[in-house]
Image (spheres, grey):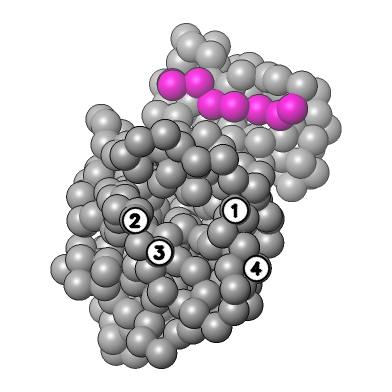
Amino acid sequence: MGLNTDQLAAFEAVARLGSFTAAAAKLHLTQPALSRRIQSLEEQLGTSLLFRKPTGVELTQAGGRLLRFVESQALLESHLREDLGQSESAEPKGVVRLAGYTSLLHTVVTPCIGAFLRSHPRVGVHYQPTQDIRPVERQAELVLRAETDLLLTVSDFGNRDLVSHFIGNQELIAVESTQYKVRREVYLDTRPEDQTTAEFLKAQPGKTPQYDRSFLYDEDGILKAVFQGMGRAIVFRSLIKKGMPCRQVKGFKPFLWPLYLIYRKQAYHLPAVAGIRDCILKDAKRFLN
């Protein structure tokens, strides 16, 4: 017996929204009716698909596989409709979602994909910041849950469900103002969860120095604060341009962060996603440092 489409739709809504309440509202169902559909689907498959927690819903391993099946079916249906309907053009179209640290998205991804977007006006992109996602391993869930199409990250998440391409190493350096007296004991981070400074200093030879932290909640704002002498900061070398009123701090060796492009392992990707992916894989290394 084939899988029930209403039950699959109920499961997909809960998986994407992470909430029975939100999914029931979206599908115009009562929560008991929604729960019955999920329960029937689990009974048919003979496995649990969701973990119910006070904070929401998480997918089991089987649930993750089923969600990817649902997504693949939707992609195949979409392209079958286009093929049978002889769509206007074979041009890539749609919105491609890219997740990662905003500094990397802007300095590495943007220059890679500009020409592709100019050549394919029906393709758009949405950037999704990942700075607040801790621990870093949780970033992979964005891809597994189909909440993003491509993930730029410093961790290798390659496994049977995810493809991981090593792009290259990005250099982190310590910088300070050249205009004003520097508060050398202060290091600027985006937020308390930001471990960039801690990891950089820990990687230096000798004893890790004592330091104070200042949180600015904005990556661009950190450089502006460095210019004003508000403290030192650990930044990607690619962010520092000629003429900026800052310099690399002597005595600290650069710290290398590997950079990976992650996406779901599946037989078919939308042309827009594949096009953006290929641009990044081809050119990203040129923009790392």
Residue type indicated by callout 3: Val
Q: Secondary structure at mark 1?
A: loop
Q: Nearer the viewer, residue 95 or 277?
A: 277
Residue type indicated by callout 2: Gly
In this picture, residue 122 sits left or right of residue 31? left
Q: Earlier in the sequence, mark 1 or mark 4?
A: 1
| Residue, disc 1 | 185
CA–CA distance in space, label 3 to label 1: 13 Å
CA–CA distance in space, label 2 to label 4: 20 Å
| Residue, disc 2 | 251
Residue 171 rendering spot, x and y as whole percentages: 30, 59
Which marked residue is nearer to the observer: mark 1 or mark 4? 1
In this picture, residue 31 sits left or right of residue 222? right
Crowding at label 2, few (<14), some or many (≥20) Cα neighbours within 10 Å? few
Residue at screen point 38% across, 82% down: 241
| Dot 3 and dot 2 residues touching (CB under 8 Å) | yes
Question: Quarter of the image containing the C terminus?
Answer: bottom left
CA–CA distance in space, label 3 to label 4: 15 Å
Residue 212 rendering spot, x and y as whole percentages: 65, 47
In the displayed structure, 154 sits above or below 219; it is above
| Residue, disc 4 | 230
Can residue 56 be found in the magenta stretch?
yes
| Residue, disc 3 | 249
